[in-house]
Image (cartoon, rainbow, N blue to C red):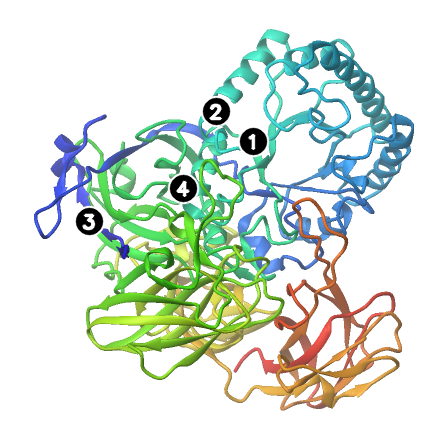
Amino acid sequence: MRKRQALTTVIAGAAALIAATLPGAAHADTDKAGQSKAAAQRISVDLAASEGPVLHGANGALYGLSDDGVPSDAALAPLKLTTISQKPEGGAQHPNGDALTVSKSFFRNGGDDVYILLQDMYTQWPYQDLGIDDYLPKVEKMARDVASAPHSERFVYVPFNEPDQIWYKLDSSDPAAYQKGRDRFFAEWKTVYQRIRSIDPDARIAGPNEAGYDTRFLPEFLTWAKANNVLPDVMTWHELSSGSLKDFQSHYDHYRALEKSVGISPRPISIDEYANRRDLSVPGQLVQWVSMFERNKVYANQAYWDAAGNLSGNVVRSNIPNGGWWFFRWYAGMTGRTVKVTPPTANAIDTLQGLASYDPSRKQAQILVGGSAGAADVAVQHVDRDLFGSRVVATVSEAEWSGYEGAAAPPRVLSRSEVKVGADGSVTVPLTGMKAMSAYRITLTPAGTGTPRAADVPWSASYEAESAAITDGQVYTQGTVSNANGYAASGTKDVGSLNKPTSKVAFDVDVPKTGSYDLAIFYGNQAGAPSTQTLTIDGQSARPVTYPSTLNWTYRGIQHLTVRLGAGRHTLALAHDKGEVTLDKIDLTAATTPAASYEATLADPSGSPRYDYSSAAGVGTGSLELDGPDAAVFDVYAPRDGYYTLTPRGSGAPVKLSLHGTTTTTAPERALRLFLTAGNNRVTAASATGSAVRLSSLDATGAGDTTGLASYEAESGTLGGAAATTSSEYASGGAYVGSLGAGAANNLKLTVQAPSAGRYMLIVHYANNQRADGHQYNTNIISRTADIAVGSGAAQRVTFKNTWTWNDYWSVGVPVDLAKGANTLTFSNASSYAPNIDRVQLAPVTG
């Protein structure tokens, strides 16, 4: 059985390694048994070779937002999105993702530009060809809508989508057919272009937006467009094959040369669809795409292959990060200028690639690498000793793949060490045991006094399902280079057809010592309801394992449970019980006390905080000095709804922490008990008095204590109109309230008790599986909304994403202000149906 151990890292000054890491050179190594291991690859970073300011251009998504609130603000804001692509308001191609609607949350959370795919007004793909006379009135309406909308200058019109594959057949190999389609496109491009400008004179128009880079059509188009004064303001095309990883650079170079030959000024480039299913959500794959787009300073949006509203597979439910989200959070945190990175092989599919930033004002260098398994030497050149000093702190973290729907805790710090800068200004960070699906971040900061806290890396191992003992199941191959639109799977294989009473997968595992272990099961479930298997350890008594639904059998999620194992070998068997799941792999990790340290110098700052590296103690990346209006925003992860202990580490003035719209004050090093919602929580730290406070980190501990939370079953409330209680074995009290909404009278009223007046989190447990008609490859799920009012106060509209089935219950946290004593909550929707409500929980933000 294949087993992978956790990554180990060793860090050394370049002077000790320079002979082994010359360009093109490689060095061999041996394992403990004396067997030769693969030679380490070399990827070099030159901090003196600037490529320009960090653009953050490659973090966008096509239909990444489906509604205002899906994804949540806490999931959107940290990623600093530059672009998204959406459909026109009221467009019929998909049931949600309307550009003007989602722009509210996009702009609210710092987004830059919304690209509007005008042809997504139509219901079918390929778009039904009803002629320009049918299309033009639709374009006119959208142009009027945008021109009168707030922030109209931040919308970009995309008049045609993949014209090579729709009405114009520009990909035809028949010269006559191609010329006929080209001439029609030219005429209709000009007509639509000029009509948009007549309504919205300042409009930015993007195109031609072909499905791939086209060396036949583009020279003709640009020459003609220049002559007719209808050049696009933004040049767009798609990169949707594995081959794009090797071909994009030549496409980019060809286009820039084409601009010069035609005599037009350089245009911004937007690759407004990129990547395959096997790439999305996978940090190691995303590194390869993002590095080439950022290097060339182009904008790029991940493709929409599945469901809208999850940032192309990087957000779980509405607020929960997965491994891909954490990679993009790293990318968003890069500041200053990007610098030259030289990989072992340029422009090659599935190879080690990277990007790096250097910010002298913060005294930080950040390097993201990934895309290859094995070992690598990350050689950093021209480390400025005047800025960094003679020693730096090098911190290495790993963002692991957690599946499309697997929640991911913050990337684990693998090593934190002081390193001497070589006489030539270089530092080399060797990495071993790299996983192809993971991405790695290396940060370099000045080393002050004191010793950085050593990283605590628990023992961990992975076991592939296809390598286990399989009874009445079948091995399937998933996303590969040749099947790029297959879903990602560890080892490119999983085990399915586990639907017989005798189906079982038995894993032989070997653990180093007796203790508790986290068992993470990577699975898929398209059975229509939560499914169960039984887990046995060495054939002993069975315990049930419940798997919530996922989008489909290969849209991977993770189920965690704790097992107690003695030192040595064991057999962990997962057998069919109820429903069906597919199995990809299991991870075993030695259980540890849940804790995370979020470095202040890597938080999102506001104002003008001072970066201080006089001490390397603790997390080792220095501290942030906040005074006056300065603040730092931390992204704090919670594995479930509940109370956690948050401790601001540092010294100086009292600290105020703001969360869920309320503020609490504490002294540095003094803990607070605060309620966090499952997933990401934005916590703002600032000085409570205006005097200086110095923060090194915000530490979070706990697994989500729910002791004392008040819980109210929906069926215990007062039902109005058509609202009705329905029995369900999957609901918490055996029943839920449905038929809510579609009329204000069809409501639910719950009376809840608040021990004191103040800000509370209302945790609403719900189900929703409303869908529109199917699409070729997109799942047209629909979110539902509910208006929630406290007493006679104004209602707030809350969006509830689709839960994949009516039998799966998710939760959404809603901040509410309550008076002391009894408060009546009303759930309603006058215009459309609200979700089914199972129960609500109530918790004061400050515990």
Classify residue 214 by image quadrant: top right
- Badge 4 marks a residue whose secondary structure is loop
* CB within 8 Å, label 2 to label 1: yes
The residue tagged 2 is 247
Counting residues from the start of the chain, the first of labels 3 and 2 encountered is 3
Q: Which of 442 and 686 is in front in this view?
A: 442
**Residue 521, position in %: x, y?**
42, 65
Rate crowding at label 4 as few (under 14), some (14 to 19) or many (20 or more) other CA atoms within 10 Å: few
Kindly tell me whether residue 618 is visible in this rendering: no
Q: Which residue type carries mark 4?
A: Ser
| Distance (Cα) linking label 4 and label 3 | 28 Å
| Residue 478 screen position, x and y as percent | 47, 47
User: Tag 1 or tag 4, which sits nearer the N-term?
Assistant: 1
Labels 2 and 1: the sequence-earlier one: 1
Q: Tag on residue 239?
A: 1
Dot 2 falls on a residue whose secondary structure is: helix
Contact check, label 4 and label 2, Cβ < 8 Å: no
Of marks 3 and 1, which one's residue comes earlier in the chain?
A: 3
Which residue shows up at 44% across the image and 27% down it?
246
Of residue 536 and residue 40, the one placed in the foreground of this image is 536
272 on left or right of 716: left
Choose between 669 and 826: the one closer to the eye.
Answer: 826
- Give the number of the disc on residue 361: 4
Image mark for residue 10: 3
- State how far apart marks 4 and 2 are (Cα): 36 Å
Dot 4 or dot 3, earlier in sequence: 3
Q: What residue type is labelled 1?
A: Glu
